[in-house]
Amino acid sequence: MAGFDLGDGLRKVFLAGVGALATTVEKSQEIVDDLVKKGELTVEQGKALNTELKRKAAEVKEESEKKDAAATGSADGEAKAE
């Protein structure tokens, strides 16, 4: 398996996940803003919902960074063992 870098592959998967997460957060904020404009949510409720979404997104990002670091670390260890 010369030329295949497992760490690089994991990094690309991680970055794709972060990109998807960022897109999801942006779209959810747009939906909340639209609901506020339509009067289905108050401005305060919209702000609270946006804050909660950002907090959850940050938690998910932090967890996936930890998993990526752990996976990359174990992949590097396996590569050195070979």
Image: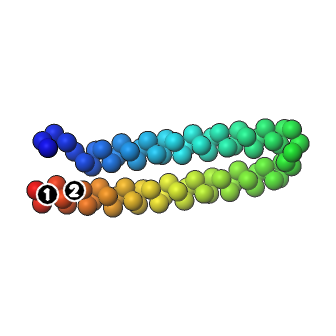
Please identify the quadrant where the N terminus is shown. top left
Q: Pinpoint residue 14: horizontal percent, then vertical percent.
A: 40, 47
Q: Secondary structure at mark 2?
A: helix
Between the C-alphas of marks 2 and 1, the distance is 6 Å
Kindly indicate whether the residue at mark 1 contacts the one at mark 2 (C-beta within 8 angstroms): yes
Q: Judge left or right: residue 54 versus residue 77.
A: right
Say which residue label 1 marks: 80
How many neighbours does mark 1 have within 10 angstroms: few (below 14), some (14-19), or many (20 or more)? few
Residue placed most toward the observer, 16 or 51: 16
The structure residue drawn at horizontal position 86% and vertical position 49%, both measured from the top left corner, is 42
Query: Which label belongs to residue 76?
Result: 2
Looking at the rendering, which quadrant does residue 73 occupy? bottom left
Q: Dot 2 surroundings within 10 Å: few (below 14), some, or many (20 or more)?
A: some
Residue displayed at 41% across by 60% down: 66
Q: Secondary structure at mark 1?
A: helix
Tell me the quadrant of the picture where the C terminus can be found. bottom left
Q: Is residue 13 above or below residue 53?
A: above
Residue 24, horizontal then vertical, whole percent: 59, 43
The residue sitting at 22% across, 45% down in the picture is 5
The answer to whether residue 8 is left or right of residue 38 is: left
Which residue type does callout 1 highlight? Lys
